[in-house]
C-alpha cells in the first residue's frame, strides 16, 4: 500500500483528521483539488474564522439522528481546540452568543493545522483531483497522477455550499457507489426568498435590521432579521432556513420583549392623538412600523379612534407575522449543507461507515448541520479528530 490513510479534502475536518492520524504514526496523505488548503476557513467569519462556540451541545445540530453528534462532542470540546490555539500562540476573542474568533486572521487557523500536519509527518498534495474510490480495504483512489492505495480513506470534501470555492457532491457520490444512503442535500444557513406580493412589502425596507424572533415549526431563533431587496436574511433568518422545508410558513415576532396588544391599548389611553404607526415607531424603525400597520389593515387615524379589536388584531400580527417563502437563495449563498451521508450508516464513535470498514466520513460530508456561530467548525474539529483516532 502507498499509505495507511488517504484523506480526501484539505478543509477543516480533513486537516484535523490527518494530523490526528499522523500523530498515531500512520502514513497519511491529504489530497485536494484546490491549489491551497482551507479555503472555506479563510473566507469564514469575515476573514477571522468563527472557529467554535462556548455553547457547543448536541441540540445545536440538525441530523436524522439527533444523538449522533453526542459522542464526538464529548470527546473533543471547545476547550480542547482552545488548548491547541494556546500551544500555537494564536490570540482569540469572544463575541455575542459564545462565538469565538481569531484576533488577527483566519490564516492563523490554516497555518496552525498545516503545522500540526507537518509535525505529524502528513504528506499534502494540492491541485490533484481525486476520482473514483474503489476496493474494500485496501482502497484505491484514482487521481490524475495515477491510482493511490490505502487501508483507510476519509471523505472530508464537505457538501455543496459555496460552489465558487470548489464545493462538490464528491463524498455523496462515493457513498452512493458503496450503497450507503445519502439524505438529500439542501442549502442551510441561507437567505429566504418570497413571492412578489411579499417582496412588494419587504423591498422598500431593504437595509433595515431588527432584533426579532423567527420561528419555523418548533425551532425559534432570536437575533437580527435583515430585510433585503431579495427577501429576508440576517442571523435569525439564516438559522431558521436550515429547518425550513418547501411549503412551510415562517413567523416573525417583531417585538419579542413586548406584549404588543397590551402596549397598543395602553397607548390608546395615554397617547390618543398619535397615529398607530407613530406609536409603533417607538419600538420599531418607522418604515417597518408603517409596513406592518398597512399589512394589518390599520389606517392612519389616531390610535384613540381605532377600535380595540383592530388594535388587538394588530398586536397579534406584530407577534406572529406569517409569510411563506418560495425558496432560498440556494447553494451560491448557503453557508452549509443540510443532509449528506446518512448518520445511521456511520459509527458515532469512529465516523466509519459500518458496512465498509476503513471508509470514513467527517465534517459536512455527513448528515450533520450546525447552527450559525462556530458550531459547524467545531463539528469539523470533533468529527475529524475522532476519525483520526481510528483511521
Image: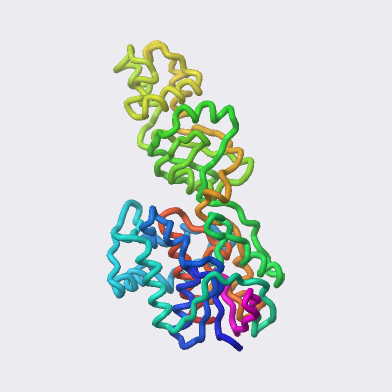
Please say if 103 is above or below 178: above
The residue located at (63%, 44%) in the rendering is 246
Task: Give the image location of residue 96, x and y in percent.
Answer: 33, 51
Image quadrant for the N terminus?
Answer: bottom right
Total marks shown come to 0
Q: Is residue 201 or residue 252 the one in the foreground?
A: 201
* Front-most of residues 364 and 104: 104
**The C terminus lies in which quarter of the figure?**
bottom right
Residue at 58%, 27% in the rendered image: 197
Q: Is residue 250 visible?
A: yes
Position of 260 relative to 351 (above/below): above
Residue 149 inside the magenta-drawn segment: yes
Residues 332 and 172: in front is: 332
Residue 215 percent across, percent down from the top left: 50, 42
Please, which colouring scheme is shown? rainbow
Q: Position of residue 160 (x, y in %)?
A: 58, 57
Question: Magenta residues, as a range?
Answer: 141-156
Q: Quadrant of residue 80?
A: bottom left
Does the rendering let one see residue 351? Answer: no
Please name whichever residue, 117 or 239, is drawn nearer the observer in this view of the structure.
Answer: 117
Q: Residue drawn at (54%, 39%), measured in percent from left and top?
A: 250
Which residue shows up at 62% across the image and 68% down it? 344
Side (left or right) of 80 relative to 69 = left
Residue 390 magenta-drawn?
no
Tell me where residue 101 appears, x and y as whole percent: 34, 59
In the depicted structure, whether residue 154 falls above or below residue 1: above
Location of residue 211 by image quarter: top left
Amino acid at each position: 500500500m502507498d499509505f495507511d490513510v488517504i484523506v480526501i479534502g484539505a478543509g477543516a475536518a480533513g486537516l484535523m483528521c490527518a494530523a490526528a492520524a499522523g500523530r498515531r504514526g500512520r502514513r497519511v496523505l491529504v489530497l485536494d483539488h484546490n491549489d491551497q488548503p482551507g479555503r472555506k476557513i479563510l473566507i469564514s467569519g469575515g476573514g477571522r474564522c468563527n472557529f467554535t462556540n462556548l455553547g457547543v451541545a448536541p441540540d445545536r445540530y440538525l441530523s436524522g439522528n439527533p444523538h449522533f453528534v453526542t459522542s464526538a462532542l464529548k470527546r473533543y470540546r471547545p476547550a480542547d481546540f482552545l488548548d491547541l490555539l494556546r500551544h500555537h500562540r494564536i490570540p482569540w476573542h469572544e463575541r455575542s452568543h459564545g462565538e469565538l474568533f481569531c484576533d488577527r486572521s483566519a490564516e492563523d487557523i490554516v497555518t496552525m493545522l498545516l503545522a500540526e500536519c507537518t509535525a505529524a509527518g502528513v504528506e499534502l498534495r494540492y491541485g490533484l483531483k481525486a476520482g473514483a474510490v474503489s476496493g474494500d480495504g485496501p482502497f484505491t483512489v484514482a487521481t490524475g497522477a495515477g491510482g493511490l492505495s490505502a487501508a483507510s480513506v476519509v471523505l472530508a470534501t464537505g457538501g455543496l455550499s459555496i460552489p465558487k470555492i470548489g464545493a462538490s457532491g464528491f463524498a455523496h457520490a462515493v457513498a452512493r457507489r458503496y450503497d450507503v444512503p445519502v439524505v438529500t442535500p439542501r442549502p442551510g444557513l441561507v437567505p429566504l426568498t418570497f413571492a412578489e406580493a411579499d417582496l412588494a412589502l419587504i423591498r422598500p425596507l431593504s437595509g433595515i435590521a431588527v432584533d426579532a424572533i423567527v420561528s419555523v415549526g418548533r425551532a425559534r431563533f432570536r437575533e437580527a432579521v435583515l430585510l433585503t431587496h431579495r427577501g429576508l436574511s440576517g442571523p435569525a433568518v439564516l438559522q431558521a432556513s436550515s429547518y425550513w422545508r418547501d411549503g412551510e410558513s415562517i413567523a416573525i415576532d417583531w417585538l419579542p420583549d413586548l406584549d404588543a396588544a397590551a402596549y397598543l391599548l395602553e397607548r390608546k389611553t395615554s397617547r390618543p392623538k398619535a397615529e398607530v404607526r407613530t406609536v409603533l415607531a417607538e419600538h420599531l424603525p418607522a418604515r417597518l412600523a408603517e409596513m406592518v400597520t398597512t399589512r394589518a389593515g390599520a389606517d392612519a387615524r389616531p390610535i384613540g379612534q381605532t377600535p380595540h379589536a383592530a388594535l388587538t388584531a394588530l398586536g397579534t400580527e406584530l407577534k406572529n407575522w406569517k409569510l411563506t417563502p418560495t425558496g432560498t437563495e440556494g447553494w451560491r449563498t448557503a453557508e452549509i449543507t443540510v443532509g449528506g451521508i446518512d448518520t445511521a450508516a456511520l459509527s458515532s464513535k469512529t465516523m466509519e461507515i459500518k458496512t465498509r470498514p476503513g471508509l470514513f466520513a467527517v465534517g459536512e460530508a455527513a448528515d450533520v448541520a450546525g447552527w450559525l456561530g462556530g458550531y459547524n467548525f467545531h463539528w469539523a474539529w470533533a468529527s475529524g479528530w475522532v476519525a483520526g483516532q481510528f483511521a
